[in-house]
Image (spheres, rainbow, N blue to C red):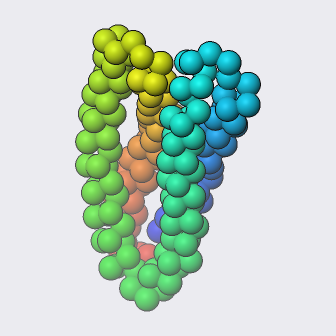
Amino acid sequence: MELLKLATEWAKAEAFSTRFFIFFAILFLIASIGFWQLGKTDLAKAYIIPTLVAGLLLMTIGLGLFYTNKSRITQFEKAFNTDASAFYQSEIERSESTLKEYTVVFKVIPILIIVAALIILFISTPTWRAIGITTIAMLIVILLVDGTAHSRIEAYHKELKLVDIKNEIKK
């Protein structure tokens, strides 16, 4: 039961964490509406579409991850009760795979931030500046939320390895 509890607590923490994507998405969408309604300068008007797109992307990420992690909670219990050993192995493999994906994320996103910063430096049109700045803001949000998710999956993976699966099967 320790294994099931561990997996369920991880999934609940992930579901909670993904709400931050939704929170920031709402902020970006409010910003887009604000620029649309109140923007007087060319730069302010240029932010309308980029902040709308960033808000929609973050909302999609947030809702998708929220429902995925919510459904995992019931799937975990079903999989554990069906075959605890197979569930344990699949969670070890899934957590290892996810950790490898984060390695890529933490290399690619900083590169994208650098590219967006270069766009701001070298292209002085309001639209491209707004795109560059909004992209940086969105990517920072992703790094913030994914940074905590990475720490959580890393801790979860370490705790999984400490579980005595033989005793779990006997229970």
Question: Compared with residue 134, is residue 126 higher up or lower down, i.e. above or below?
Answer: above
Question: Compared with residue 40, is residue 170 higher up or lower down, i.e. above or below?
Answer: below
Task: Report the front residue among 58 and 10.
Answer: 58
Q: Residue at x 36, y 71 (%)?
A: 88
Q: Residue at x 30, y 71 (%)?
A: 89
Percent coordinates x, y for residue 12 in the rendering: 59, 59
Percent coordinates x, y for residue 98 in the rendering: 33, 54
- Visible residue check, residue 126: yes
Rendered image quadrant of residue 38: top right
Task: Report the front residue among 170 and 89.
Answer: 89
Percent coordinates x, y for residue 119 in the rendering: 33, 19
- Visible residue check, residue 155: no
Question: Compared with residue 36, is residue 42 higher up or lower down, i.e. above or below?
Answer: above
Q: Is residue 129 left or right of residue 108?
A: right
Q: Residue at x 40, y 80 (%)?
A: 84
Question: Compared with residue 81, is residue 145 higher up or lower down, i.e. above or below?
Answer: above
Q: Residue at x 44, y 76 (%)?
A: 168
Task: Report the front residue among 121 and 98.
Answer: 121
Percent coordinates x, y for residue 128 in the rendering: 41, 23
